[in-house]
Image (cartoon, rainbow, N blue to C red):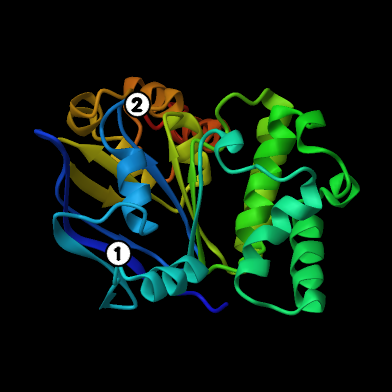
Amino acid sequence: MSPRELAADGVEVSFGHRQVLNGAHLHIPKAKRLALLGANGSGKTTLLRTLAGSVRPSAGHVLVDGQAVGYGRAALKTHRQVVQLVAQNPDDQLFAADVYRDISFGPMNLGLSEAEVRGRVGQALSLLSITDLAERPIQELSFGQRKRVAIAGALAMQPSIVLLDEPTAGLDPHGVDEMVSALECLLAAHTTVVIATHDVDFALRWADSVAVLVDGLVRHGSPTEMLGDADLVMGARLRRPLVLQAAAQLGLDLRGIRDIDALVDAVNLEFTPVASGRSRLG
């Protein structure tokens, strides 16, 4: 499916007397990486579920290519072919006996032919590098494998946009590397990828843009702009990424510093001796 534009326009969502989203606006760039950050209870999962059509806002709209999403059965079926949500806990989405049957469930419900279902499942398995798991029972899989199967199930629907709630949570470093590789495969297929995460260091180095949820509202901008803003980060009950903390202590310009390599380059440039024999800071 070709890239599509997804947006929240003044979205409000309440649960009982508690307002979680209070006029949230967010435009998600096509075929890019977006990291959604916020404290526990800030509304990250609620915003993802609202964008996916699982929660109907009390005010405002979810828009696809500028058109408001409807909430009738046919409209939601169409929307879920564009936007797929992968939950934080894969066991909330995996219920078939084996991997192949679980991934094939969504495409089968679209009324596709058996050949097309097989093609979609095979493509998703290959893209997530889990073809060898196709016949494995779900209960025999590791936590990281189950997460990748859940993503494959979403991918088999061939959406334009995939929303992932804490995709790296609970994974060891090797599992995180495998998950990042899986996300890069989605991006290579021109899929927009949105992740909700608490990991500010990961968000800084991975995302093309960052959205921060605080007080039911969304601030959206470049990773260094958002995560380098000490007041915004403190208000969202987050912390600045470690490389930005180090850069700030050294008095460096934070723009362009996304990881340790960029920090080292900035330090080397700032402290390079000039003709007088003194450093740039001297």
**Left or right: 109 in relation to 196:** right
Residue 185 position, x and y percent, is 69, 57
Residue 240 - label: 2
Mark 2, secondary structure of its residue = loop
Quadrant (top left/top right/bottom left/bottom right) for the N terminus: bottom right
Near-viewer residue (15 or 250): 15
Please name which of the two marks, 2 or 1, marks the residue nearer to the observer.
1
* Residue type at numbered disc 2: Arg
Viewer-nearest residue: 178 or 131: 131
Dot 2 surroundings within 10 Å: few (below 14), some, or many (20 or more)? many
Tell me the element at label 1: strand
Residue at the (56%, 65%) spot, across then down = 191
From this view, report whether residue 64 is shown above or below residue 202: below
Q: Distance between the residues labelled 2 and 1?
A: 26 Å
Of 239 and 31, nearer the camera is 31
Nearer to the camera, 264 or 68: 68
Q: Residue at x 64, y 76 (%)?
A: 111
Identify the image quadrant of residue 91: top right
Relative vertical location of residue 13 with respect to residue 243 in this rendering, above or below: below
Q: In the rendered view, does 267 fall on the left or right side of 102? A: left
Residue 272, can we see it?
A: no
Q: Is label 2 in contact with label 1 (beta carbons under 8 Å)?
A: no
